Amino acid sequence: LAREAAFEARIDAGDFIEAKDWMPDHYRKTLVRQISQHAHSEIVGMLPEGNWITRAPTLKRKAILLAKVQDEGGHGLYLYAAAETLGTSRDEMTAALLSGKAKYSSIFNYPALTWADIGVIGWLVDGAAIMNQVPLCRCSYAPYARAMIRVCREESFHQRQGYESLLTMMTKGTAQQKAMVQDAVNRWWWPSLMMFGPADKDSPNSEQSIRWGIKRVTNDQLRQKFVDATIPQAEILGVTVPDPDLKWNEVRQSYDFGVIDWAEFWRVVGGEGPCNRERLAARNKAWDDGAWVRDAALAHARKQASKQDAA
Amino acid sequence: LAREAAFEARIDAGDFIEAKDWMPDHYRKTLVRQISQHAHSEIVGMLPEGNWITRAPTLKRKAILLAKVQDEGGHGLYLYAAAETLGTSRDEMTAALLSGKAKYSSIFNYPALTWADIGVIGWLVDGAAIMNQVPLCRCSYAPYARAMIRVCREESFHQRQGYESLLTMMTKGTAQQKAMVQDAVNRWWWPSLMMFGPADKDSPNSEQSIRWGIKRVTNDQLRQKFVDATIPQAEILGVTVPDPDLKWNEVRQSYDFGVIDWAEFWRVVGGEGPCNRERLAARNKAWDDGAWVRDAALAHARKQASKQDAA
Amino acid sequence: MAMDVKTQYLLRLADTCLIHSQRLSEWCGHAPVLEEDLALSNIALDLLGQARALLTYAGQLEGAGRDEDQLAFLREERDYRNIILVELPNAAASSSDDGGGGGGRDFALTTLRNAAVAIWLELLYERLQTSGDAELAGIAAKSLKEVRYHRQHSSDWVVRLGDGTDASRARMRAALAVLWPYFNELFAAQGVEGFGPAWSELEADWRARWATLMAESTLALPRDSAMQPGGIDGVHSEHMGHLLATMQHLQRAYPGGVW
Amino acid sequence: MAMDVKTQYLLRLADTCLIHSQRLSEWCGHAPVLEEDLALSNIALDLLGQARALLTYAGQLEGAGRDEDQLAFLREERDYRNIILVELPNAAASSSDDGGGGGGRDFALTTLRNAAVAIWLELLYERLQTSGDAELAGIAAKSLKEVRYHRQHSSDWVVRLGDGTDASRARMRAALAVLWPYFNELFAAQGVEGFGPAWSELEADWRARWATLMAESTLALPRDSAMQPGGIDGVHSEHMGHLLATMQHLQRAYPGGVW
């Protein structure tokens, strides 16, 4: 109990916690859940975008997308490593993902249907992710905070690339391309707003997480911030968002916006989104198909080790 | 020996042999080999064309091609049935195909690379096949002769459809389409001439087969007939054949043509053509992947039978 | 795109036939037995014929001068109105896939889908043959004969494979789990008064027939899914783009070509 | 098409890098371990970069005003000059296949192909870095560093999988049997005096290095094949059309688009 009080005092003082430091069990569990979910999101997030690499319209865009998806895999790696500092293994976390026990960001249960989706995912989805993640760079758990600094830097780069690709289509493209961009925005707008999670009143874990400095801003605050930052960007782009209730509020100096379809949100979180089953099936297939490879690598390493022992 | 003499007399009299009739072992074997090869050719021949069904350029052409490939499967069925009258089973014949022991027409070891190949396969490959097969409608073994009558009728239809599709491209198409047709002719011309088999001087089985009325015309005779029939069609189409030595011979009232690349012929027959391995792999995969289906159908049929017995 | 409700109704059906045929045609030359190769091609051909008649008529109703090929080959993905069920690859379990047919072929999935769609088409065509629209009624009456055969043939296979070996039952069960949520879309489209019924009108009959077939096949029904596939509104799966890249390739690569 | 011999020489190499990269990128998100997902993407990116430099230069030499994208996306299949080896699907045993990546992914085949091509590219770039053509020499020198890493990385995997478990050795042996005849094309292209060597000049070194790698991997060499793949003359396999339908789709479907 004294340790717990000391821990709380460090948190209150704004200290960072390192892996070797004592921490309450619940703090550890909360972090493992959050970091591994985040890692899983990066890995599952490779699928909708990866699906477009073979169809990228120019070699430059192909290179950018390939590098981006590779970065996401890299983020997955750092994040799994950060979670491992808390005493869980990557294999355990992977098993939780593959069995459907662990969650990942619901946004990746929507399909990427046109090339414009790739730009919009960069702009809106990465944009929302950054909004969620920037506060985590000051998270009380230092290994996570360090990982997030790197992740956020790369994500900002991706977001700018996504926006730039949309801007190219909207300013230099054909009418068909412009319609494609608007259509993608229409489909991704609301799911992007859902990325900030349930409304604060329905968000059970938030309060404790904020107190512990794992989370620094509430869902609704972040969502508002995202809308306020994004609408001017939409205007520059020349697209509208599919929300008849969207309106600048002079008093709040902020945008009012319509009500999220929470039924859809919970349906997708609950496993009934357009791609939930396919995402999990794809991850399971990759894992199962790769079993012989992992086995062989292990067997070979053992052979090498025993040869060295013999020598 | 008396039976053999009687058999030879019937052949010489132009009689047809039926399945129930006595026949020399070698006659039976020769027929099984030839009919099953022919059946295998129909089945393997479904692959290069089947590969284009999903890409057919119009719905009408898609329907024509789908029906054509289906017909080839149907030819395979009659021919296997004709061979079965000689006391071999379809499973035995299939096993011989899949193991690489049985042959099929070497022409299907060339790839169908463009849509024009589909038309050219109809025109040249089916054309050469018909040239080979029409004499077989008078083959001394009646079940084979009957199958061939039906096969030839349908093949002639396919050949006309193939030619008609080329004519459409050559007379109404774009310059790119015309180039595509010429390119396909360039690639398929020589392999089509090879379909008549080795030169007569190098064809070991021909003599006996002709004597028995299994074969009625020699390879070289058929090849010449094919060239003479085809060149005027090429002229109407507006394509050339890739043979600088091709020339009308006034004396013979026939075309002289260049020397076939017999090294290529034997290489492809010997298993080293562009697609030999892939064709066999595709057939094996279909067969292996289908094992559980065939097993289940059998198991279900047994269950039904035993239920009926019990009732 | 504001589309006439009749044209939209036709396109939902026409595209479903077209894309179903496209997937089936990927089997050509690769079926478990030769007889089944012929049967699958035959079903694909019938569905293609239905798609052609329906697309041609949709083009006439639309009045923009588009023929069957312009509708089949030159729309953007978002303008195809088929149910997602028929665009799913012939084998499950890959997010990115194949339009060319090599992405694996699962005869269990194919057979179940064939049966599900055939039962549904039979119910729909039964009603459409008395449509107030004579052209549509005529297409439906002709198609009805075809899909009855498809229903019979594929149902026989579902029973054979469901009540075959343990291995075949396991495959059928796995395939059913994959397809099940997509069946919801069979009942999703609205009707057009005097033209065609709301698909929801087919639901009770379809579910009853399906339940009977499953019972005969010794296959249990999965629990209901709340998934809402959006193919009939042009929001497809990620498989559709690959299918279209393949299907449209020649028309796109050779503009102005005459075939 | 009569093509300048230098342009043709470049296209054979450029297209080989391009199509190899395209196939590798189909792995993205589907590799056996996350680290390998990153490594395969990395190799694909390097090859794509090499393809871009080479295509751009080929376009300049050709002098018809075509840039890298026009060359990469708007040629007909018969005008691509890559070796067939790199266009083969990532898993064998289907005649018709897939451009989208779902046609199966065999890590054994992929790893062997990566090693074979990397050893070959290393030998080729070593020579090309002293090409009399400064531009080509520059591209080669830069690329050489990249392919050395590819060769090392993929060779390590070949050894690991060849000398791993019985199952992995069996898979490697099967994959080697599939690829082996296509290796012939690595030595098929003619040289251009003062520009680049005949590929036959690489053959002895390549075969020696390959034999060493196979020995270390405990894999036996198959018997020599007389197959003569014709990719460098534009006569491809039936897989190429599917790959291109996918790769070219957007450029074909949206003419005049700016991306």
Image (cartoon, coloured by chain):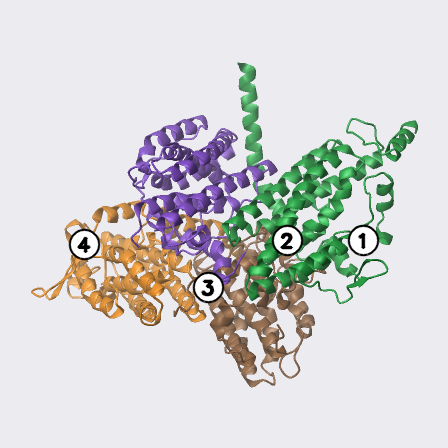
Chain colours: A green, B orange, C brown, D purple
Circle 1 chain = A
Residue placed under numbered mark 1 in the picture: A198
Chain letter for the residue marked with disc 3 in the picture? C
The amino acid at mark 1 is Pro
Is circle 4 on the same chain as circle 2? Answer: no
Residue A276 visible in rendering: no
Q: Residues within 10 Å of mark 1 (few under 14, many from 20)?
A: some
Alpha-carbon neighbours of circle 2 within 10 Å: few (<14), some, or many (≥20)? Answer: many
Q: Nearer the viewer, mark 2 or mark 1?
A: 2
N-terminal of the pair, mark 2 or mark 1, is 2
Determine which of the numbered discs, if any, sits on residue C252 in the image.
3
What's the CA distance linking mark 3 and mark 2? 28 Å
The label number, if any, that marks residue B206 in the structure image = 4
Is D258 rendered above or below residue A74? below
Percent from the top left, x then y, of residue A104?
A: 71, 47
Q: Position of residue C186 (x, y in %)?
A: 64, 68
The answer to the question of whether label 4 and label 1 lie on touching residues, with beta carbons closer than 8 A, is no
